[in-house]
Amino acid sequence: MASKRKYNQWKKDPNLSIPKRTLARLKKNAAMATCTSETFISDVVEVETVEDIERNDNVICGLTDVGSSSQTVDSIDSSDEACVSDENFDLDLAEQTSIIINVESGEDHAYDSDTLCENQDEPCHLIEDSEFRDNNMDELNMSESETYDSSDEDDSNKDNVNTEYLYPGSSITIQDSILSIMKYSLRHKTTYAALSDLLSLIILHLPHDSHKEHLQSLYFLKKAFVAQTVVQGEAEKPDIAKIQNSYQILTMHGFSERKRVKKSLQNAERSWHDVMDGDLYRELLKPGGFLDNDTNLSLLFNTDGVHVFKSSKGEIWPLLVVVNEVHPSVRFSTKRIILAGIWFGSKKPPMATFLAPFREQLNHLYHTGVLIASKNITCHAVTLIGTTDLPAKAACQEFTQFNGECGCSFCEDKGVIVSVGKGHSRAYPFIPGPPRMLRTKDKVLKQGTMALQSGTRVCGVKMVSQLTLVDGFDIIRGMPLDYMHSVLLGVVKMLFSKWFDAKNKKEVFYIGDKISCLDGRLCLCQPPDYISRLPRSLADRKYWKASEVRSWLLYYSLPVLHGILPDELYCHYALLATSVYHLLQQPVTQSGLLSADRQLEEFYALMSKYYGESACTMNVHNVCKHMTTSVKLAGPLWAFSCFGTESWNGTMMKLIHGTHHVATQVVAAIKSIRLVNIEQKQQFDDDLSRETSIFFANLTRPIRNNCQNLFKGCYSVGGMNKVVLDFQQLAELNELIFGAAVNVEQAYNFKKAIYKKQMFYSKLCTNIKKRNSYTITYLASNGEEKFGQILYFLKVSMAETFGENNEYCVAAIEELQPC
């Protein structure tokens, strides 16, 4: 076995010269430490060692990245595994890394890795690790330690160096070339090797008299890109009062929804459209409340562990933040979710350490806020909601886990120990009436203090959580129940185990011997296009994603189970499916909420009768006793579900291309995305070439093949065929459009259309066998709602019109008659 490479020998032996890379880094860091006029946008690095973390070569790295923006992965619709190299990776010898976004600091700190490790008993593995730099990040790492400093160059040359054309006769400038390459790399998630080959390929196609300096290697590309961004940035160091364009203050959706909710505060009849209709938001919206100020925002945060590699125990824990005032359709998009911190290690992060910087930043946003100079507005933010699964929730709240005494995060129900097979488990039998001994923020704070003083848990509270110290945040009411984990991956999958596992074959509820019959029915289901996954065999149920379980619960299960599951059990299960359906509506009505509450109460009361006392798990207890309360507090279940934030994990996994310094890879990639977007926005306002603008537009918009814009919000998909309309078609068409005879000049039919971001198919799509996106509900001419099937789409051009528009698009629909 080869001996390990020894580092920093030049410090011990004065006869050895300093390595070139180390010397260059030291010079650059010294220049950055004295630089007072320029910095890399608003990014400042701050590194500190933490002694109270378990010794496993741990280092906490703090990253200031104001307003930086971008749904375990095995249980959601995301890519399942990261791109992993073949090398052996022993995670126990790797670092645990946490990177926290800081919005307060305005100072640059440049550190050498040896300085950080001076008083440590064990070696540190930092992002400056020379082996890592040599193999992975030396060429295109956007970490702060590698920030390019051009302060010693002539300022006059900075303004002109990248505005020259790429070569004589070229239509794009050097800066267009740099930005286009970076945009392409980020869109297609290229590895460093692929990007390097792309640069070589571009050089082959360029004339000899071209400006190729930025194309020689990834190092020169990064250097040119960062230098360009620095020049275009603020002339001064980033100050919280001078940062611009870092936050989207409030969308029109936020303004209009606040006005609607304010008007409804006095109404006796309530409905829940979104987070803003929940009690948590409404309490702050009252006159004089925090959110009565239209410039203030509310935040939702999420954290959960994601397994990165199959062959190791490594987990990555991102801290994600979402602005509730953003429209629901884009609220949880990757561009809107803010990465506030990240941890990577073989164990769960110690929450007291992981959440401490996060708590400080949330309190800063609450009290001091951010001054948006361009708007002359100070924006404050309150932490309204936190959403996680049960294990992460217990860790964040510093409570006993769900399988321990007093493990409920909403009440102090102790539960009981029941026998399960050869062992035991904790159950929460049904108790009639509303939940008793509810937890409160003040009570939990006192119990946490008592637990610290006594060294023993008090009603399941181990210590004072960092989240308890977040101003304006209620650690109990503000952490509602997530239905993705509790209902879908909890209660429904537990019922799967009861129904289908062979160990229950002697029980009345066992139907595992009828899986083939159930699969036959399930495979006959033809979901529409907006349900991403087709139904698959119940034999593969343990591999089902959360979205597949959701489709089963809401769409497939009742018709598939009918006549196979015993009637009493079928009606019992229908209570769960119906109640969850009510709580996912937009809006959730008062009557729907009351109905769901009654159904869940009945479901809970019958659970032990049909499945035994051991089936009354923590998930059943939470769903049946506390889920409707969560809706009252925070809006419909979808508004604070982990589906939105955990889908981001799939995006994050695609940013990982190696086994070393995983957290740094993610942060570097996200920072690159942010810088490209900032630079692109600046250039669009100035002198970005037309060709580059078109290229960016093609990279940014969703990939659609052969689409044609018909009118606002509507596209045809696929080719069009010219047709001749018969007399009946002409008569119906003329009556539909004008109510009078008009000459049709040309007519084309097509198979698919996108309308209001939803794909619709017609029956002309004969090659699609397993989906049905052509059966619809529609309003007839008399206003009556009917069912029908789309036969085809038609685009017609009129020879005569009474208006300016002479092209129309219609759908030919065949009405369905009841059987």
Image: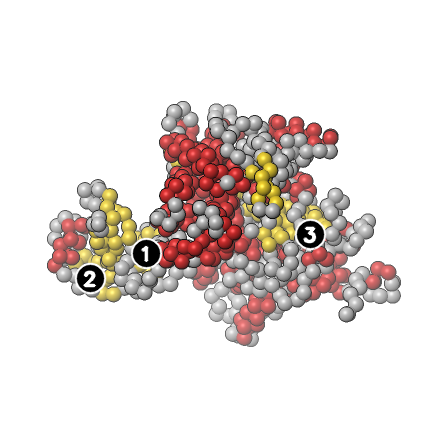
Q: Residue at x 24, y 57 (%)?
A: 791
Which mark, residue 406?
Answer: none
Residue 642 is situated, as x and y percent measured from the top left of the image, at: 51, 45
Pointer 1 local density, CA inside 10 Å: few below 14, some 14–19, many at least 20: some
Q: Closer to us: mark 2 or mark 1?
A: 1
Q: Which three-letter amino acid code belongs to the residue tagged 2?
A: Gln
Q: Residue furthest front?
A: 506
Q: Closer to us: mark 3 or mark 2?
A: 3
Q: Which three-letter amino acid code belongs to the residue tagged 1?
A: Asn
Label 3 element class: strand
Q: Residue at x 74, y 43 (%)?
A: 52
Q: Residue at x 50, y 40 (%)?
A: 612
- Report the residue marked by disc 3: 96
Q: Quadrant of residue 636?
A: top left
Q: Quadrant of residue 443?
A: top right
Pointer 3 local density, CA inside 10 Å: few below 14, some 14–19, many at least 20: many
Q: Earlier in the sequence, mark 3 or mark 2?
A: 3
Visible residue check, residue 375: no
CA–CA distance in space, label 2 to label 1: 29 Å
Q: Which of these two is toward me, 318 or 526?
A: 526
Q: Residue at x 77, y 70 (%)?
A: 1
In the figure, is residue 437 to the left or right of 285?
A: right
Q: Are marks 1 and 3 in contact (CB under 8 Å)?
A: no
Q: Is residue 797 above or below residue 194?
A: above
- Report the residue marked by disc 1: 772
Q: Which three-letter amino acid code belongs to the residue tagged 3?
A: Gln
Q: Earlier in the sequence, mark 1 or mark 3?
A: 3
Which mark, residue 746?
Answer: 2
